[in-house]
Structure formats: structure tokens, C-alpha cells
Image: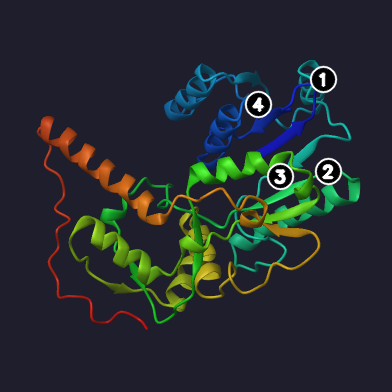
Amino acid sequence: MTVITASVAASKGRVLIIGATGFIGQFVAEASLDSGRATFVLARSFYANPSKAKTIKSLQDKGATVLHGAIRDQELMERLLKEHEIEIVVSARFLPSEFGHDVDRADPVEPGLTMYKEKREIRRLIEECGVPYTYILCNSIASWPYYDNTHPSEVIPPLDQFQIYAYFVAGSDIGKFTMKAADDFRTLNKSVHFRPSCNCLNINELASLWEKKIGRVLPRVTVTEDDLLAAARENVIPQSIVASFTHDIFIKGCQVNFSIEGPDEVEVSDLYPDESFRTVDACFDDFVAKMEIDRRKSANEGITTKNHGVEVLPITAMCA
């Protein structure tokens, strides 16, 4: 997901979002609309996936202008940017599709490494060409892996002997702070790190918090470093990429093993100290509410739901 901003006569610039149907892209597009910016989204003329078509329709209903085209069609893109006054000018800002870790610092195993090498190449091109930019490094999204749409109640929490922490950020906050940073002069040509202290948690704490929400204890399984590396080596997409990044986060500690102190980087809470983050606790409340809605829907339709109420001994093997 890529964001291009351009200052115009209005108090807030025009924004073109490429990838607005993506998981994070939708949050950014909605935040752009909520901020009052003229928001344009690049979309295909046809989506085979009904959910993506629904997302585009929803954004359009909220006021987004849909531009049909493809990012690789240079001639078309130049024409669209000029027609809608989103030209690449000195005052414009480019936010490349990162929205995760600092790819210059993180060093995941394959297949995740290939993705990061591509992002590093894009960074170098941006910098060499003198394109004004902001790198958004929001770390982990406070959600569950969405590639198979599995609800966390159906996932056994992985535990290991490691107590490495990670930062979790709600999708709505990723969108909100991205749009704040998009045309903030303090973020020009800088990396913006998201490190909310309220959401710095390890796997054990996440699992325990979830169990408190659902009122029962889930069975435990130990996932070792070797297990993650083996899953990554299988090169099954996207599972192996998830294993690669999980290893980088919770074994190597890629989100917490460095200090933010360079002249070209800043922490988002230092920029906007009066703005709060949604907590993981609140996000889990949303998950529980969704579980209840799904349960009632299934009951009304006469569908037998899975029993997630596994009774086991109290947790005594929590890692310290």
C-alpha cells in the first residue's frame, strides 16, 4: 500500500492511495477521508474478489474518488496525477508500502528477506532521486493473521522460553497516525516509528490477556526457534513468510533491539503526545464481540459451532 500526498490551495492536500483494498490500506484510506482530505484510490476496473469490490464501494460511499488503472502503467498514472492535481511536485510526499519493520535494520530469514530486499531497493531509489518521503514503521498490527481468516479462539497460543517483546498497533491507529505524519514537516525524509508503551507485550502476555477475555484456559504448545525456521524453509506462501517474520520479531527481537536516536528518525508519540493509542485489551474486546455475533448468527441458522471451552490445568509453565 502506497500513499502519495500533494499540497494544494486547500488547508489539506490531496491524497492518492494505491492498495486501498488491502488490510492496512483500508485503514489508511478511511483515516484520510475522516481527516477531510480529498482522497483518491487507485483501483482495478474489475475485482473478482467480492470483498475487495465491497471495500471500494464503501470508500466511494464515504467520499473517495476512485481512479481506475494500474500502477505499472506509467503513462496512465502520469495522466491521472495531472488531471486530479496530485502531481509529483516539491511539496508532495511519498509514503512507500512498508507499514511494518525498519527494513534497513531487520534481517529475517527467507522468504521474508526477499521482501525486505525489494523494499530496501525502493528506499534507495527514493533517496537517490530526491523524492520527498516518509517511512511509516508501525511494527505489528493488533489483529490476528488474516491470510486464512482464522479467529484467535481457534489458534493455540505459541509459547517458548523467550521473553522478547513486540509493539502492537490497532489498524485504526495506523491509519490515523499515518495521515497525521503524511504532511507534517517534522516527518519529511524521516522514518516514523510506532512504539506505544501501552502495547509492548510478549507472546505469554498476549495469550494470558486473551484467556481472561474469553474466561477459560487454552491448551499450550511450545513453538521453538527450530520450528519457526523449519516452517520458513518450507516456502509455503504466506505461511512461511509469517514464520519468517515471527522468528525475526520474537527470536531476534527486531522491533526492540535498537534505539531511536538518529537524526532521520522519530517516534510517533513524541510528535503527537496528546494522541492516545487503542490498547490491545480494547482490540481483544472487539474480537470477543465478534465471536458473540458469529455465535448468535450460527445459532439462528442452526449451525453447530466449535467448542472452544477446553478445560486444562491452570497455567504453571509460563515463561519467566
Quarter of the image where the C terminus is located = bottom left
Label ID, residue 132: 2
- Please state the horizontal and vertical placement of residue 24, each as a whole percent of the image: 54, 42
Residue 186 seen in render: yes
Q: Residue at x 22, y 76 (%)?
A: 315
Residue, disc 4: 37
Q: Secondary structure at mark 3?
A: loop
Camera-side mark, 3 or 4: 4
| Mark count | 4
Report the coloring of the rendering.
rainbow
Residue 1 seen in render: no
Residue, disc 1: 82
- Please state the horizontal and vertical placement of residue 54, each as a whole percent of the image: 45, 24
Q: Earlier in the sequence, mark 3 or mark 4?
A: 4
Q: Earlier in the sequence, mark 4 or mark 1?
A: 4
Q: Earlier in the sequence, mark 3 or mark 1?
A: 1
Q: Earlier in the sequence, mark 2 or mark 4?
A: 4
Check whether the beta carbons of the residues at disc 2 and disc 4 lie within 8 A of each other. Answer: no
- Please state the horizontal and vertical placement of residue 280, each as a whole percent of the image: 40, 55
Q: Secondary structure at mark 2?
A: loop
Label ID, residue 284: none
**Looking at the picture, does residue 186 appear above or below residue 256?**
above
Residue type for callout 1: Lys
**Looking at the picture, does residue 273 appear above or below residue 302?**
below
Q: Which quadrant of the view contains residue 178?
A: top right
Residue, disc 3: 96
- Please state the horizontal and vertical placement of residue 90, each as a whole percent of the image: 89, 35
Residue type for callout 2: Pro
Left or right placement of residue 305 versus residue 59 in this view: left
Q: CA gap, disc 3 to disc 1?
A: 20 Å
* Dot 3 alpha-carbon crowd within 10 angstroms: few under 14, some 14 to 19, many 20 or more: some
